[in-house]
């Protein structure tokens, strides 16, 4: 993969320049040491240089370099020096073999790289297709369920508007509300994943009151919360942080939604914010069952879901969280609490300012 990236990094013109400069530099060093190094050794060194270049660059620059190195070997190292005429039959064979081997090596190395790239591309396409099939299969259920709930609830209200009690109407409306939130989450996750994969995600940083932000996210999560308790004790001394408020909201929504889905009833979900040096630290923890230790390294992978999970999902939430945290040059760490449950720790390096400083800006 590294070789592939390096090959694509340079234009053809730069490849010619770098490859010829490399051969000329190696030739100069060998010439300065010619009293200590036999010209046959020099031939091997130049051949190795051509082989390295063949691993990095396209075929034409490599062929030009191979021919150039052969001419340099003839002119500067094979007797008589400073002429292309070779009198010794053994040296003629050496020169011809050098040219043949370097040219064949260049072509074969390029062909091998082509085959490797095609095989890698094919493998990546197959993997992508498999992942998206997994996503579509999951979404076919994830989207159908809330849509069916909304349609069914609306039908009940339309057909039995005068027959059902106000309490029943309230229950039905709550179901519509929860299904709408669930549906909206799936759509937002798809859009967010698209933003991450497109590579066009740009931060819109501004001063952010994390206390206000987290309270807002908790309030929006309340309709989904039936048997859980949120614990968030605002820190009055925490400063404002310069963050992308929209992305941080998505981070918190996905973490809280994940906790609501995958923790048992009556679990407590705790949120803490800490200011450590130049870092904004956000901790989301619960007293649920936690994660199997051997599964923790994989939970942030796209489309990944715990094999033992009985709850449907797209497997996008935590991968989006990781992507948005890393967009801030931050890190996210998952561990199990010693007393039980999971603990997500987000560390984002950022500027800080207290309200009194903001007023002076």
Image (cartoon, helix red, strand yellow):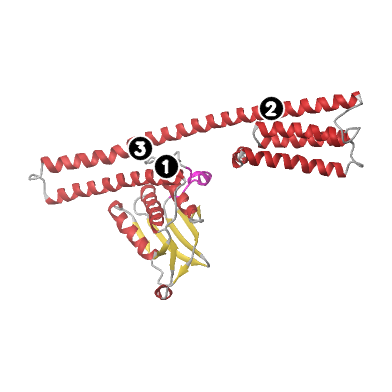
Q: Residue at x 39, y 75 (%)?
A: 359
- Label 1: how many Cα within 10 Å (few below 14, some 14–19, many 20+): many
Q: Residue at x 12, y 42 (%)?
A: 158
Q: Which mark is residue 88?
A: none
The C terminus lies in quadrant: bottom left
Q: Quickly name the residue at label 1.
A: 315
Task: Give the residues drawn in magenta, as a range.
Answer: 289-301
Q: Is residue 71 above or below residue 359?
A: above
Q: Are marks 3 and 2 in contact (CB under 8 Å)?
A: no
In this image, 336 relative to 268: left or right?
right
Q: Secondary structure at mark 1?
A: loop
The N terminus lies in quadrant: top right
Q: Quickly name the residue at label 2.
A: 107
Query: From the viewer's perspective, is the residue at label 3 or at label 2 nearer?
Result: 2
Q: Is residue 237 above or below residue 78?
A: below
**Residue 87, located in which quarter of the rendered image?**
top right
- Label 3: how many Cα within 10 Å (few below 14, some 14–19, many 20+): some
Q: Is residue 282 above or below residue 57?
A: below
Q: Earlier in the sequence, mark 3 or mark 2?
A: 2
Disc count in the image? 3
State the image coordinates of residue 342 (x, y, percent, origin top left).
46, 53
Kindly report the distance in space between the C-alpha atoms of the residues bearing marks 2 and 1: 44 Å
Q: Quickly name the residue at label 3.
A: 139
State the image coordinates of residue 326 (x, y, percent, origin top left).
49, 53
Please say whether residue 296 is one of the residues in the magenta stretch. Answer: yes
Q: Secondary structure at mark 3?
A: helix
In this image, 132 relative to 121: left or right?
left
Please say whether residue 34 is one of the residues in the magenta stretch. Answer: no
Q: Residue at x 14, y 43 (%)?
A: 157
Q: Earlier in the sequence, mark 2 or mark 1?
A: 2
């Amino acid at each position: 993969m590294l070789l592939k990236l390096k090959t694509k990094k340079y234009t053809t013109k730069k490849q010619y320049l770098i490859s010829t400069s490399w051969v000329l530099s190696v030739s100069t060093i060998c010439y300065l040491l010619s009293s200590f190094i036999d010209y046959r050794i020099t031939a091997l060194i130049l051949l190795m240089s051509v082989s390295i270049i063949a691993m990095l660059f396209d075929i034409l620059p490599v062929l030009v370099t191979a021919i150039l190195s052969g001419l340099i070997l003839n002119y500067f190292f094979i007797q008589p020096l400073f002429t292309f005429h070779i009198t010794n039959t053994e040296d003629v064979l050496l020169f011809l073999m050098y040219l043949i081997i370097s040219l064949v090596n260049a072509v074969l190395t390029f062909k091998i790289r082509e085959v490797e790239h095609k095989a890698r591309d094919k493998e990546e396409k197959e993997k992508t297709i498999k992942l998206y099939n997994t996503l579509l299969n999951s979404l076919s259920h994830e989207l159908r369920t809330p849509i069916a709930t909304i349609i069914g609830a609306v039908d009940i209200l339309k057909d039995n508007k005068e027959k059902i009690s106000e309490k029943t109407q309230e229950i039905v409306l709550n179901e519509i509300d929860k299904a709408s939130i669930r549906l909206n989450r799936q759509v937002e996750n798809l859009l967010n994943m698209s933003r991450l994969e497109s590579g066009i995600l740009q931060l819109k940083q501004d001063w952010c009151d994390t206390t206000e932000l987290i309270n807002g996210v908790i309030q929006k999560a309340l309709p989904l919360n039936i048997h859980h308790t949120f614990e968030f004790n605002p820190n009055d001394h925490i400063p404002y942080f310069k963050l992308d408020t929209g992305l941080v909201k998505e981070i918190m929504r996905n973490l809280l939604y994940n906790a609501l889905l995958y923790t048992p009833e009556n679990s407590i979900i705790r949120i803490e914010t800490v200011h450590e040096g130049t870092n904004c630290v956000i901790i989301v923890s619960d007293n649920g069952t936690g994660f199997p230790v051997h599964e923790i390294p994989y939970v942030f992978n796209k489309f990944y879901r715990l094999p033992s999970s009985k709850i449907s999902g797209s497997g996008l939430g935590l991968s989006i969280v990781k992507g948005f945290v890393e967009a801030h040059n931050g890190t996210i760490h998952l561990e199990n609490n010693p007393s039980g449950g999971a603990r997500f720790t987000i560390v984002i390096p950022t500027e800080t300012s207290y309200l009194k400083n903001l007023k002076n800006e």
